[in-house]
Image (cartoon, coloured by chain):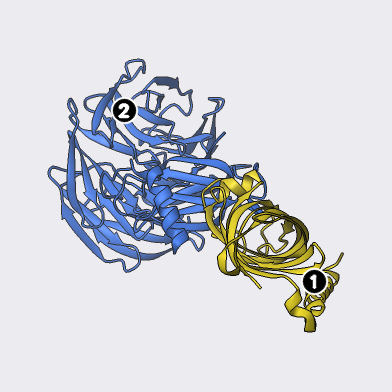
């Protein structure tokens, strides 16, 4: 699926969710939260360069779509400094994943257990401190995200979200310095597990 | 900036053990029983290295890395080797040579051996450096009277001339590889050839034909069919030094007063004359070719600015004979390590080159060459390392490093690849 199709699908998905609300918005369940999490990359090279993972944080909105099926939309931010493997050249990675998809909620006495699946366009920026490569490169990658977690109901319509996500994404940077044949591009594996919690308000 | 600081820190670890020993380049002058070390920046004697047992040190040669000086003592019938780092003097055992009077000495361009001519008999000796193992050779008639010598920079041939008792107008050749001898006939107007100088490409030899008329005798095509060219007339010519580009010769005459003539070798003409002390004997140029130093067996050393022809002098105690001027000492321990520098999105193939500092505080920078191409210059005050980007991990064997000072650039030291 190309980038344009992904974008169209995302827009339709979000608009659909809110459209379903429309005049009947009050009867639909909407959860808005701010999440903090630890992103643990699965790729060994990533972990070695950036000294394992780091903090990932951002807002997420979950809204009732139909019955127990909810849509979600999230925007996260991750940034970590590291050193290359070899001569320890400084490097920095920035990830801005935009998640969207569906959750299936199963109520229980303290809240709702959920599983979810979606796709996740991600903005990736890598800054490498080496005279031999382009210092800063960025690109969009299109991956996916799987979610499992629990909304714990708190007083005053607040809730606590405990979750484990897995995001999968590989991106390629093709830009190399002019006349530098010795630089070989690698596919950047930025998949990983996300452990975290969020605090939100249930409308 | 962050990147530079990081590299600085990394490389400081690799170079923290380097040391600075002295200033250079120096002129090394053979005095009767010592070696006088003169800082060519100030023309001051900055060190005197005693040579125990020496009586009349005469001809002197310096290894290309400026580490050793070898000097002959014709009256004491000895040859001495001096380690300039430790100032240790070694007496070379030349008892295996059937002659007692070492005269002139020259060192191969790779610094592995010194060759010495001996007076009164037809002998030549090789001294391995630094072991000081002596290998004697007996020269065959009619080229049986070795006097002054010059070693081709390709280290394949030694050119020898006879002294004033030699009737033949010849320059002898001695193959370092095969030890075979031959001769180039018809050189000059007398049998006395007190000076020889050879170009850096090993293809042209300039012989100093003594007498009146005498002069510089160019011998071209040494690497194919040697051809004796017409003499550039300079009467009483005694010795010759070549400029670094081999285009200019600086000739001294054994006259009173002595003359240092600047000779355009391609035009075969004298372009300037400078009056120096009586009966000059040895002439040497600084590495940049800007100054000619002349000794004449007295306490005076004459310095001629080759650009302006201005003459100055300074005094020694005691007298000065043979002279050699060091070039900028090269760096040592030049090693390279192949490294794959892995970023998340890219991998670079790098040759990480490190070296130890040149033993000269005058060194201002180090040049890194890939073949003959200058790829970088690294300050001597910074970390002594360089990361060369490679096409692949087999293309780094052609890198070399030189030291640069006001006295010129050192000989290149090839990068030794570490596995």
Q: Residue furthest front?
A: A109
Residue position marked by numbered label 1 in the rendering: A10
Can residue B243 be seen in the rendering of this structure?
no
What hue represents chain A? yellow
| Spot occupied by residue A127 in the image (x, y as percentages of width and height) | 58, 62
Q: In the structure shown, which secondary structural element does the residue marked by tag 2 occupy?
A: strand
Local SS, label 1: helix
- Protein chain holding label 2: B
What chain is the blue one?
Answer: B
Name the residue rendered at 76%, 75% in the picture: A27
- Residue B102: assigned label: 2
- B94 relative position to A142: left or right: left
Mark 1 surroundings within 10 Å by alpha-carbon count, few (fewer than 14), some (14 through 19), many (20 or more): many
Query: Do the CB atoms of the residues marked 1 and 2 lie less than 8 Å apart?
Result: no
Residue visible at 56% across and 48% down?
A52
C-alpha separation, residue under disc 1 versus residue under disc 2: 94 Å
Residue extending farthest to the left is B317
Q: Is residue B327 visible?
A: yes
């Amino acid at each position: 699926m190309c980038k344009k199709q992904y974008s169209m699908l995302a827009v339709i998905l979000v608009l659909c969710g809110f459209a379903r609300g429309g005049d009947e918005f009050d009867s639909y369940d909407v959860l808005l939260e701010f999440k903090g999490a630890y992103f643990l990359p699965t790729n060994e090279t990533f972990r070695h360069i950036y000294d394992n993972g780091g903090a990932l944080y951002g807002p997420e909105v979950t809204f009732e779509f139909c019955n127990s099926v909810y849509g979600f939309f999230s925007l996260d931010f991750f940034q970590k400094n590291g050193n290359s493997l070899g001569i320890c050249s400084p490097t920095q990675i920035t990830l801005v994943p935009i998640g969207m998809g569906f959750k299936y909620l199963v109520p229980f006495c303290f809240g709702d257990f959920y599983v979810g699946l979606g796709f996740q366009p991600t903005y990736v920026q890598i800054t490498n401190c080496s005279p031999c490569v382009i210092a800063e490169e960025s690109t969009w990658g299109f991956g996916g995200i799987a979610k499992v977690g629990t909304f714990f109901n708190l007083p005053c319509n607040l809730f606590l979200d405990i979750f484990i996500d897995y995001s999968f994404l590989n991106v390629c940077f093709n830009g190399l310095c002019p006349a530098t044949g010795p630089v070989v591009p690698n596919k950047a594996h930025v998949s990983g597990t996300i452990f975290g919690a969020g605090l939100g308000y249930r409308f | 900036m962050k990147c530079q600081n990081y590299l600085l820190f990394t490389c400081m670890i690799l170079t923290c053990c380097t040391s600075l020993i002295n200033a250079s380049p120096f002129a090394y002058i053979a005095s009767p029983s010592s070696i006088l070390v003169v800082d060519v920046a100030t023309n001051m004697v900055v060190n005197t290295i005693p040579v125990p047992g020496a009586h009349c040190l005469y001809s002197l040669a310096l290894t290309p890395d400026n580490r050793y000086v070898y000097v002959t003592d014709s009256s004491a019938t000895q040859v001495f080797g001096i380690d300039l780092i430790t100032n240790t003097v070694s007496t070379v055992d030349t008892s295996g040579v059937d002659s007692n009077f070492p005269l002139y000495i020259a060192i191969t361009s790779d610094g592995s051996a010194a060759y010495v001519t001996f007076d009164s008999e037809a002998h030549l000796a090789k001294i391995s450096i630094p072991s000081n193992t002596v290998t004697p050779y007996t020269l065959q008639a009619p080229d049986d009277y070795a006097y002054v010598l010059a070693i081709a920079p390709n280290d394949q041939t030694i050119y020898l001339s006879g002294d004033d008792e030699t009737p033949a107008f010849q320059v002898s050749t001695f193959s370092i590889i095969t030890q075979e001898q031959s001769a180039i006939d018809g050189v000059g107007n007398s049998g006395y050839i007190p000076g020889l100088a050879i170009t850096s490409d090993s293809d042209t030899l300039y012989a100093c034909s003594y007498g009146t008329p005498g002069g510089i005798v160019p011998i071209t095509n040494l690497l194919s069919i040697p051809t004796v060219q017409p003499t550039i007339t300079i009467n009483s010519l005694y010795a010759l030094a070549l400029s670094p580009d081999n285009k200019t010769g600086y000739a001294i005459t054994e006259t009173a007063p002595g003359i240092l003539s600047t000779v355009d070798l391609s035009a075969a003409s004298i372009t300037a004359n400078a009056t120096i002390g009586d009966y000059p004997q040895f002439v040497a140029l600084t590495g940049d070719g800007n100054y000619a130093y002349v000794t004449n067996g007295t306490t005076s050393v004459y310095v001629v600015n080759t650009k302006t022809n201005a003459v100055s002098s300074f005094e020694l105690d005691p007298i000065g004979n043979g002279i050699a001027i060091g070039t900028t000492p090269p760096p040592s321990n030049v090693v390279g390590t192949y490294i794959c520098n892995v970023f998340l999105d890219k991998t670079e193939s790098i040759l990480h080159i490190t070296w130890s500092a040149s033993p000269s505080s005058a060194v201002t920078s180090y040049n890194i060459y890939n073949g003959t191409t200058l790829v970088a210059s690294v300050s001597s005050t910074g970390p002594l390392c360089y990361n060369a980007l490679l096409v692949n991990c087999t293309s780094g064997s052609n890198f070399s490093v030189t030291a640069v000072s006001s006295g010129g650039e050192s000989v290149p030291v090839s990068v030794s690849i570490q596995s």
